[in-house]
Image (cartoon, rainbow, N blue to C red):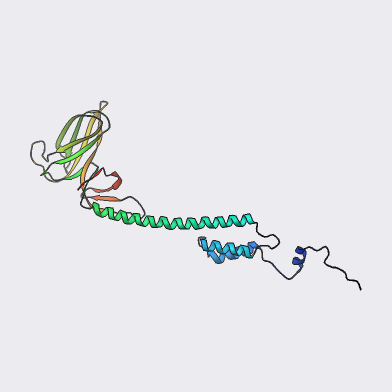
Amino acid sequence: MSVTDTTSGLSLKDILANSSIKTSTSADGLASATNSATGKKALGKDAFMQLLVTQLKNQNPLEPQDNGEFVAQLAQFSSLEGITTLNTTVSGLASNYNSSQALQASSLVGRSVIAPGDKAVVDTSKSFNGTIAVPASVDPVKVKITDADGKVVRTIDLGSQKAGTSSFIWDGKNDAGEVAKAGTYTFGATATYDGKATSLVTYLPATVNSVTISQTGGELMLNLAGLGSIALSKVQTIGM
């Protein structure tokens, strides 16, 4: 009795194709794992690992995943882990920065600062000091002091000034030698440069009433008494 080999010429792939054993494709497995792992959310490290394990389970046994591809995916997972750790660290640094900024803000309240501006609240019973930014040698430099009604109460002639910073002092008196009323005054500095009258930047003292801390990481704002707000970066000097 002869026996005929009916499997000759058939490959393992043909046998699997004709058998009842079904292998799911990696694409279907990955799609299912993606939906269950992410739930339409950002892909995190746990979901990434779940997708990697699912891909290994559903790979084609006849065409297994290449070792190089597997190593590359592990490298991607390592990078994702590092980015997650970095985000956590940065969030901690941001929180510490906000705490430090709040501490810095509390120490500025009630202190005097010198910042660029043309207005100042002046106590005329004592001398008032200010500075002027002089971009080049000019002649002459004058400071006009105007009250809240727009009336010029005093003009200070500083004469010729070299490039740099020039200081001036107002004794609180008007041009008639009378003590002016305390209040808010405007200081306008001008100089003749190349035959033309040029406005100069003045730096005036002010008192910090309160501080505004940005909730979005913006710059610290100082609220000056009677003058409005100014960014901390624009402050030239912080005094007592």
Residue at 43% x, 58% y is: 88
188 sits to left or right of 84: left
Q: Position of residue 23 (x, y in %)?
A: 68, 66
Residue at 40% x, 57% y is: 91
Q: Between 169 and 152, which is closer to the camera in this rendering?
A: 169
Q: Residue furthest right?
A: 1
Q: Residue furthest bottom?
A: 1
Residue at 36% x, 57% y is: 95
Q: Between 19 and 148, which is closer to the camera in this rendering?
A: 19
- Work out whether residue 34 can be spotted: no
Q: Position of residue 140 (x, y in %)?
A: 20, 29
Quadrant of image for the N terminus: bottom right
Q: Position of residue 3 (x, y in %)?
A: 88, 71
236 sits to left or right of 48: left
218 sits to left or right of 148: right
Q: Quadrant of residue 50?
A: bottom right
- Work out whether residue 232 can be spotted: yes
